[in-house]
Image (cartoon, rainbow, N blue to C red):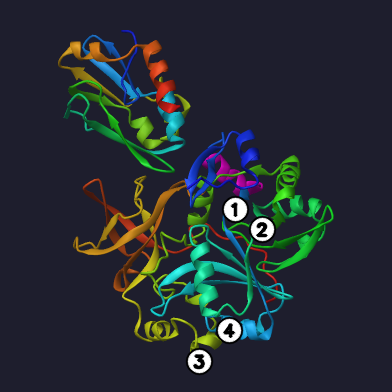
Amino acid sequence: MSEVKFSKEHEWITLAGDVATIGITQHATEMLGDIVFAELPEKGSNVEKDGTAGVVESTKAASDVYTPVSGEVVDINQAIVDDPAKINEDPEGAAWFFKLKMKDISELDSLMNKEEYDKFAKESSS
Amino acid sequence: MEIKKTSLNKLHQDCQAKFVEFAGYEMPIQYSKGVIEEHKFTRSHAGIFDVSHMGQLFIYGNENLTSDLEKIFPLDLKNLQQNCSKYSFLMNEEAGIYDDLIITKLENGYLIILNAACKEKDFEILNNILSKKYKMELSNDRALVAIQGPKAVEILNETINGVKNLTFMTGDWFDYNGQKLFVTRSGYTGEDGFEISILNDLAEEFTKSLIKKGAELIGLGARDTLRLEAGLCLYGHELDLNKTPVEANLKWAISKERLSNGGFVGSNKIINQIKDGAKQIRVGIKPEGRLIAREKTKIFNESELPIGEITSGTFGPSINGPIAMGYVDKEFSKIDTKILLEVRGKKHPANICKLPFYKKSYVKGVN
């Protein structure tokens, strides 16, 4: 499993072989508040880097979920659709969103590492 | 314009509130527990709400004032007992709603609780209709604190002895630390509870005493989910100048006595609408599944023809599912009518349902 990388849209991504697992960050869930709805991309569909790949809704508002890399959706986490509160409980673990078979692994290069993301999150929320 | 702060602002900060601007005030949207926990705590224990941003309008006068107010509000104020409250609206000639409000008869006049965003305009409208004949005060020196939930009566009665004897939609003056408080048994969550009008200087200490007894501060986020579950209208969403009380399904708030004779602003329109029926009417809506349909979501019938629009939609924590209110053409307003809601370009099934979503637990008296 690769190092965890992060996007400016507050997604995290890890890579195993050419399959990436993507979710939203702890910081994102803290900003959103209680999540009560999640919509994920369809299995077998193709998503493009920085395009929308789902929706999460808190009690207050709907927010798009973006994918930080391109690829084919090979798996989705149905458990978070059935019980969206799981996203608040363990956003960077059990509550991953979807898995992609990546087309171009170099797309990861432009993403942030943990230290860079923490700094970015802190600055963007202040 | 500088953002206004209520007298409880420091306490909100100390309790880790997240703030939003609401009607020109810095108000807590939630605290560290979050909307769902705050909502559930109110339903099971007692929540404290800072509603000091709302207008507290005192109008002083006697029988003449009562007659003049009857020309404005569709209420039988002559027969309203002292210290009793009614829900009503300020309307224009077309029965469009400037604001919805609670009016209470006092010994020497009336107290009207107004929405924060409307209060200054309401003052001008009322003062003009009343030809500036009466002394009117939109209070700046009083906070308004609500305590709501099944434990509210026990907790508040420990602090202000005697409030337990009030019944729903009645009020009275009580002593607190040598000052007078006006307490009404009312609220906007569907729970039993009280609203306390208190001098700014005493508000923080008073609120802390409620917290010490087990009540917790609740933000505007949960206030919205609570009122929506209770099927209560929010001004600017369910109600505005383009809606009438008949369309809003609030006919119950119009005195029958006044309907037969009219003579209040908007009465012609209301009498006609009750006779002929309104084109659209406010309904409760439950989306199937977990989908949330927000304000402005378009509503369609099963043949995919547009029939209305959502005015409020969220997740109801006590219902454990999505809920909404909106306006639909009258022929589609019957309970269990199947409708479609267009969210993010797709039409999703939903049903018209009975209001409220969550059964109210008011402590009603004899009147």
User: Mark 1 to mark 4: distance in Å?
Assistant: 28 Å
Q: Do marks 1 and 3 share a chain?
A: yes
- Label 4: which secondary element: helix
The answer to whether dots 4 and 2 both sit on one chain is yes
What mark, if any, has residue B68 been given in the picture? 4
Sequence order check, earlier mark of 1 and 4 = 1
Residue under mark 3: which chain is it in?
A: B
Q: Amino acid at mark 4?
A: Asp
Q: Secondary structure at mark 3?
A: helix
State the separation of the CA atoms marked 1 and 2: 9 Å
The answer to whether residue B99 is above or below residue B8 is below
The stretch of residues the image draws in magenta is: B35-48
Spatial CA distance of label 4 from label 2 is 27 Å
Left of B75 or right of it: where is B236? left
Looking at the picture, tell me which residue is in the foreground, A69 or B22. Answer: B22
Q: Report, in whole angstroms, how far the alpha carbon at label 1 lies from the one at label 3.
A: 36 Å
Determine which residue is flagged by label 1. B51
Q: Which mark is residue B195?
A: 2
B229 to B37, vertically: above or below: below
Q: Earlier in the sequence, mark 3 or mark 2?
A: 2
Decide if residue A4 is on the left or right side of residue B229: left
Residue B230 at x, y percent in the picture: 52, 58
Q: Is residue A39 visible?
A: no
- Dot 4 crowding, Cα within 10 Å, few <14, some 14–19, many 20+: some
